Image (spheres, helix red, strand yellow):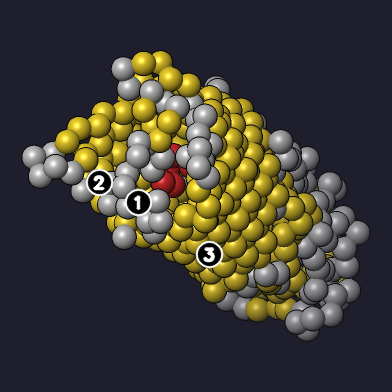
Amino acid sequence: MRGALLLSNGYAGGNGSVTGDRLTLAGNYAGNGASIVLDTQLGNDSSATDRLVIQGDATGTTSVRVNNAGGSGAQTHAGITIIEVDGVSFDNAFLLKGDYVTTDGKPAVIGGAYAYTLQASGEEASAGRDWFLSSELNPTNPGPGPGPENPGQGGGGRYQPGVPLYEQYPQILASLNTLPTLQQRVGNRYWSLDGLTKVSLEGLDDTQWAWGRIEGSHQNADPAKSTSGSQRDIDLWKLQTGLDIPLYQSQDGSLLTGGVNFSYGKAKADIHSFFGTGSIDSSGYGVGTTLTWYGNDGVYLDGQLQTMWFDSGLSSDTLGQSLVSDNHGRGYASSIETGKRYALGAGLSLTPQTQLTYSRVDFDDFRDPFGSEVSLQEGDSLRGRLGVSLDKDIVWRAEDGTTRRSHVYGNVDVYNEFMNGTKTHVSGVDFSSRDKRQSVGVGVGGTHEWQNGRYAVYGNVNLISATHNVSDNYSIGGTVRVRVGW
């Protein structure tokens, strides 16, 4: 096309799916509220694309809409050139009409795991400028605007707003897949005098226990490793009910108990990143089994198994829309714990203990509204705990002749994560997240029993934090539990 072209409130576009169209204007171009649609296979620098070539000057302002013609996204370096202007042009000559606006104020279109912004080469009002699509966080001559404080380990890629949520999604499921300590689960069922021998209770040798507990917590995490530089806040509650049955009691007073329990919980998480913010709502229900050995010398051994099923929805605040709903997941967890109670006298005892917990979560693969494919690659955790509790037991006879007991304790724990965190696959790109490996915890709690131990109520509060950057890496929670025997 030769001469000058004035496009006022007009439209020029590609064919909607096939790239490679080229429109050349052998003259000046003036856009006045005009729109241009170009088909581009959003990928790396060599991606196929439509192209507008202007051999004269470009004035006015034209809106550019980019259709992704099947591209799965990739990080660019030089960028994908879609407009060439041989003459003089200004920075506002072409403005991208994107899927959203980035946190640093740039319209962007989504391709796979990446977001593409429209950038111009050269200086404003100079000749020979190109307009190119870039998925690089800080492309050459990108213009003004702040960068992220913590862009993660992405090598300079600009990720789409869903990525932080996809990366943290397995971490939210893992928060619902945890297992308690023996103390948190049962209170202090196995009472002892001076920490060594069980208090004898006539008629309770074959007692069955029904119990229920509810726990709640608030968690903040600034991961030690996050490809997208994400942080998360979680509010969580979990209801658990179960039945414990004595399986065997030896003549020396040792006791073996088995149990089954059912649980239901919810977690609501807010995810924050330079690339986008959003929320994840997950619910889960599960079934578990327990087996516990209480030795007459104060030694105990406790094992737990649990299976969970999850249902989740992910929503992006940056995009203002849902990314996926009713996504199903699964969780498996097991734990082994052992300890030994030592008498200190006057009803005081000290119990060193250790616990090893394995957890694995997974979720169904899905495709988000922009065609990005999301799947989980790694969702395993192996966490060790080494701790000690100081306990105080008080036993007395009530006016009706029945036995009452109170027990209070304080505990200190050290935790270590042995695995490398989670990894989510988004359209060919891996996004990893791992919390800080070491953390410490403190807690206090107590149990009160009456009617010869047939009824009990228990509660505890605990705080767990990383060994540094505590204000951004902590969990505070509590548990209330009731138990009835017959």
Residue 36 in picture, x, y percent from top left: 69, 72
Picture layout, residue 422 above or below residue 152: below
Task: Name the outermost residue toward the front.
Answer: 251
* Labels 2 and 3: the sequence-earlier one: 3
Looking at the rendered image, the disc whose residue lies closer to the viewer, 2 or 3, is 2
The C terminus is located in which quarter?
bottom left
Residue at which label 1 appears: 204
Question: Of helix, strand and loop, which one carries label 3?
Answer: strand
Q: Is residue 76 left or right of residue 271?
A: right
Viewer-nearest residue: 53 or 163: 163
Amino acid bearing label 1: Leu
Rate crowding at label 2 as few (under 14), some (14 to 19) or many (20 or more) other CA atoms within 10 Å.
Answer: some
Q: Quick one: label 1, few (<14), some, or many (20+) residues within 10 Å?
A: some
Quadrant location of residue 85? Answer: bottom right
The answer to whether marks 1 and 2 mark residues whose Cβ atoms lie closer than 8 Å is: yes
The CA span between labels 3 and 1 is 27 Å
Image position, residue 336 (x, y; %) = 62, 43
Residue receiving disc 3:
287
Q: Is 88 placed above or below 265 here?
A: above
Q: What is the CA distance from the residue labelled 2 to the residue labelled 3?
A: 30 Å
Q: Label 3 is placed on what type of residue?
A: Val
The numbered disc on residue 479 is none
The three-letter amino acid code for the residue at tag 2 is: Asn
Q: Are marks 2 and 3 in contact (CB under 8 Å)?
A: no
Task: Please name the residue shown 84% across and 80% down the image.
Answer: 18
Residue 326 horizontal/vertical position (percent)? 54, 74
Residue ID for mark 2? 452
Q: Is residue 451 above or below residue 323?
A: above
Secondary structure state at the residue bearing disc 1: loop
What is the tally of numbered marks visible in this picture? 3
Kindly report which numbered mark, 3 or 1, lies closer to the viewer in this rendering. 1
* Viewer-closest of 397 and 115: 397
